[in-house]
Image (cartoon, grey):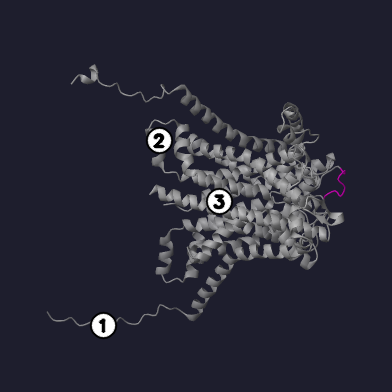
Amino acid sequence: MTTLQNGGPTPPDLSGRNLSLRRAVADRGATALIGLCVLIAALPLALVAWQVVSRGASAWSLAWFFEEIPRNYRTEGPGMGPAILGTLLITGMAALMAIPVGVLGAVYLNEYGKNKPLARFIRTMADVMTGVPSIMMGLFIYVGYVLVIGDKTGFGGALALASLMLPIVIRSTEEMLRLVPDELRQASSGLGARKWRTVMGVVLPAASSGITSGSLLAVARAAGETAPIIVTVGLTYIYKPDLFDGQNTTLAAQIFRNASQPFAASQERAWGAALTLITIVFLFTILSRIIASRFAIDKR
Amino acid sequence: MTATAPPEAPPEVDLGGEARSRRTDKGFTGLVTLAGLTVLIVLGLILVTTSVQAWPAIAEGPIQFLTGSTWDPNDELFGTLPFLYGTLVTSLIAMIVAVPVSIGIALFITEVAHRRSRKYIVTVVDLLATVPSVVFGLVGSIVLIPWVTPLYQWWAGVVAPVPGLNAIFDETNTGRNYFTAGLILAVMCIPIITSISREVFATVPEIDKQGAYALGATRWEMITGAILPHSFGGLVGASMLGLGRAMGETIAVALVIGGSLGINANLFAPGNTMAAVIAQQWGESSGLHTDALIGIGVVLFAITVLINFLARIVVQRAELQMKGARS
């Protein structure tokens, strides 16, 4: 019984200390490179946050949020009120159109279509549609709406943003509906509810927090869109609370317009608008996170 | 054994409900189906309306429209080759930078990071995705360009004696060029490529990884031996989705690419891309010029839809294979 102590094979050393130098270096080096990738991604985020906050904060004042936009690039001074109002109104209107249609579309995919060929095709095309360049939505609304009614309006921008949000809302809502446990549907049918009552009274309320959070993310993304806005909305310097009444403007469009000018006054306005826009987008994103984590469906 | 009498038929129960309620149900089915079809309707309308509108500009010569290298709205000469070239070059630069970095991040999240730090890295990548593209353009054009221009000049000086390289990295007097646009696009593609790559890595069977470790592999050998071969198809799909995103990006590129209308092999020279030229020239265009810009949009739409469609199929197929391997 002493063979093990005398001449038996020594237990293998599993500590990795006797790795060949080449393998050890490859492993450590690769891990370091992978870590470097994370830094490379964090760097632009830090740069953007630092620059926007440090340069944009000086533009902020009470007047900044309420005054009209100066007409001349060279005019110093505040004023982004119309763009803030325009951003909120146009994005809000887009949400009013895209979210109901998107949620119902998702209901079709998850509750009615399921694995039918049509539903699968729509699912794929919704994914494809999320990849359509945003400027294309602007061109589409320009041809299909602006040219028809003959004027660039805030509502045109809302239509373009709605087309942009639609596939995002559909896909995120469908993910949420999929999490609703089947027992709920069966219990509802068992009580004699028709399918539409089951959907409206049981499935959608059960998924409501997830749907809200996904929709808010879509809203946040749409609020920062520029290309469809400059194509369909035009430009204004004054408050335009009526989206159907002539040209309008948004924060993103103002950033683009002012950033391409060499004048210090306009560039300062661009930074101020960027800080305002990022704040709005950030608020929506955080709100979406809070709703998602606080009211999440039990994942059983 | 006496035959039992057949049980009496149960009393008729009407489970049909009222006719009104039945109609509501039918109506609701119709409504949601219509909502689902909206996606197809909108996609179809995009293609049809924009193509019809752009037709006068393209009709002169569809081949000429794609291969002509002169874009001169005053002479009504519309050749989109310079912009096709610009889109291709900038998104290629973006891919070369973004794909390895994104795969690295995804590997870090799935294999290297601790569970607690994982959450923060995911947040960083998500935040990168929420920054509006115009803000990237703003930071790029005002902050980044003055920083990188001396770097470009230094690099052009270094490679000047090397034939081939000195044509690609030639002299520059402005940082507004293909290369800067490519770098900004790379940053903007990282979130989407990372998130799809993570999904793909998540489908690699745990037993493969443990098997590799059991054979004495280091972490890196496990990654190259077990994870990457399994995920290759999915990673190709993820990169294609990033490519589609890069090709369609408009505003950030419009602010940093310079806006020249020619084709230049020098990556440090100003150029233009399909999406960016639409945004830049939209305000001052009218008539046939506008139609031609919409025509560029149609071409861009066709390319990006094709790339996205193929990418989705590649990703779906890869994930199916993965799931098959797991069971």
Front position in the image: B122 or A286: B122
Q: Which residue is labeled 3 in the image?
A: A291
> Could you say whether the residue bearing mark 1 is in a helix, strand or loop?
loop
Q: Which residues are magenta?
A: A69-75
Q: Which residue is labeled 1 in the image?
A: B8
Q: Is residue A151 left or right of residue A131?
A: right
Across and down, in percent, residue A220 comes to: 65, 51
Which label is found at residue A237? none
Which label is found at residue B212? 2
Q: Is residue B301 left or right of residue A295?
A: right
Q: CA distance from mark 2 to mark 3?
A: 41 Å
Across and down, in percent, residue A67 comes to: 81, 49
| Dot 3 crowding, Cα within 10 Å, few <14, some 14–19, many 20+ | some
Residue B185 in view of the camera: yes
Badges 1 and 2: C-beta atoms under 8 Å apart? Answer: no
Judge if badges 1 and 2 mark residues of a common chain: yes
Sequence-wise, the earlier of marks 1 and 2 is: 1
Q: Is residue A277 above or below residue A188?
A: above
Q: Is residue A108 left or right of residue B2?
A: right
Judge if badges 2 and 3 mark residues of a common chain: no
Q: Is residue B268 above or below residue B7?
A: above
**Residue drawn at x 48%, y 36% as measured from the top left:** B224
Residue A276 in view of the camera: no
Amino acid on which disc 1 is placed: Glu
**Residue drawn at x 43%, y 62% as measured from the top left:** A184
